[in-house]
Amino acid sequence: MFADATTAALATGELAVSVAVIDLDNFKGINDELGHAVGDALLQAVGEVLTAHVPAGSTVARLGGDEYALLLHGTDQAAHERTLNTITTSLRLPQHCAGHDLVVEASIGLAAARPGDTAAELLRRADVAMYEAKNQGKGRWSSYRPAMDQRGAEQARIAGDLRTALDTGQLHLVYQPIVDITDGSLYGVEALIRWNHPDRGPIPPVDFIPAAERTGPIVPLGAWILAEACGQAVRWRRELGAAAPETVSVNVSARQLREAGFAAEVAAILRRTGLPARHLTVEVTETAVFDGGAALQELHALKALGVTVALDDFGTGHSSLGLLRTCPVDLLKVDKSFVDTVTHGGEHAVIAAAPIDISNGLHLRAVAEGVETAEQAAELRRLGYRYAQGYHYARPLLPDALALRQAPVSVH
């Protein structure tokens, strides 16, 4: 029906038409936790929200799963944008479904018709814009721009090269020390991926990790990182004994956590490498576990193994405090934005002190990230922080360089 309506509008030569694609951001978690009957009731409620807020003459359709589409008429893009703003705001309100009050946000992409468009092409561009909205943090809308296609093609090329890189030894890990700021001694390390492309040279993680997340290679890449980091931790323990890092931290993506059996895969890696679970820390971001569902179940399974769970970039999201009630967290990685202003005094110091007060009250450990100066380190120590990482202490190091760095750093 939706395809027919779009085709009919375009066949008349009408370019005053736009398509919006709407994808619910956390529907799977609701379906997994509350069951399909509640999920179906929520889908109906979302349909009612959409039909209630589109202009007369618009077409509203459910394309499948938790994805909807709107066919909007008229050349007034500002009016279309107001419609999408109203929809995103309305979807943030609790929807009463089958005895539950549920909040579900949506990512929306908007595309306007161009000469020669088919219904499929118009829908494709709206879909590209929708994924851009997801990449920007979900719960928002984005209008299609040609650069999005270029970025998508580049991401696909990077993802293809990344699969080759996994098989040909182009990847390696470096390790940034996490120190005890009371005496400067080495506490742990965070494993960070590096890629030296044979033709393009070093490719920053910020360029290839999002591509891997979107197109799939993040799952085998993540497994490789885990195995490599655990194997290196075992080698350090064999070579350095008590001077080896107490823990190796590995970042785990939302997509990895959604994979069925992720915790079982981690358990297999620990058995294969011989690393005791207590020496592995898994770092996850708020967005990876915000939807709950399978991701949260996998974290509980990791915790049951004895793996430490860290909440990365703590304090930057709108639900960080709420997650501490549901997520099996052992450690908070306090975001660099708190550290940057910690020496400014006044309200900045109060804000920087809040995470350490929370961690102490909940019997968690806290690591301050991005420490770059002696003054920041001294103030963090005064506020009660014990652990930190950043360029003030060391840049990410190759395994052999880390083995040589056993003397404590200076403490100010």
Image (spheres, rainbow, N blue to C red):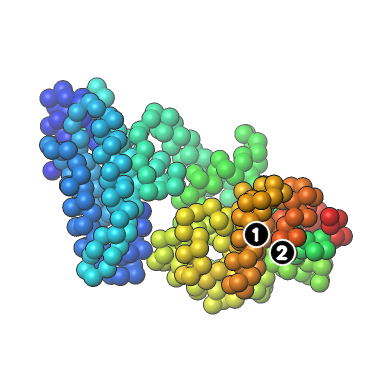
Percent across and percent down for residue 366 are 65, 64
Task: Write down the residue under mark 2.
Answer: 384
Identity of the residue drawn at 58% across and 50% down: 166
Percent across and percent down for residue 185 are 81, 63
Asked whether, in this view, residue 199 is left or right of residue 50, the answer is right
Q: Compared to 138, does 116 lie above or below?
A: above
Quarter-of-image position of residue 266: bottom right
Kindly identify which numbered label has been placed on residue 265. none
What is the secondary structure assignment of the residue under circle 1? helix
What is the secondary structure assignment of the residue under circle 2? loop
Percent across and percent down for residue 298 are 47, 69
Q: Residue furthest front?
A: 346
Residue situated in front as seen by the camera: 140 or 277: 140
Q: Residues within 10 Å of mark 1 (few under 14, many from 20)?
A: some
Task: Write down the residue under mark 1.
Answer: 353
Q: Is residue 171 visible?
A: no
Q: Is residue 141 visible?
A: yes
Identity of the residue drawn at 24% across and 63% down: 96
Percent across and percent down for residue 347 are 62, 51
The mark nearer the N terminus, 1 or 2, is: 1
Quadrant assignment for the C terminus: bottom right
Identity of the residue drawn at 52% across and 71% down: 328
Between the C-alphas of marks 1 and 2, the distance is: 8 Å
Amino acid type at image mark 2 = Gly
Identity of the residue drawn at 78% across and 55% down: 378
Quarter-of-image position of residue 283: bottom right
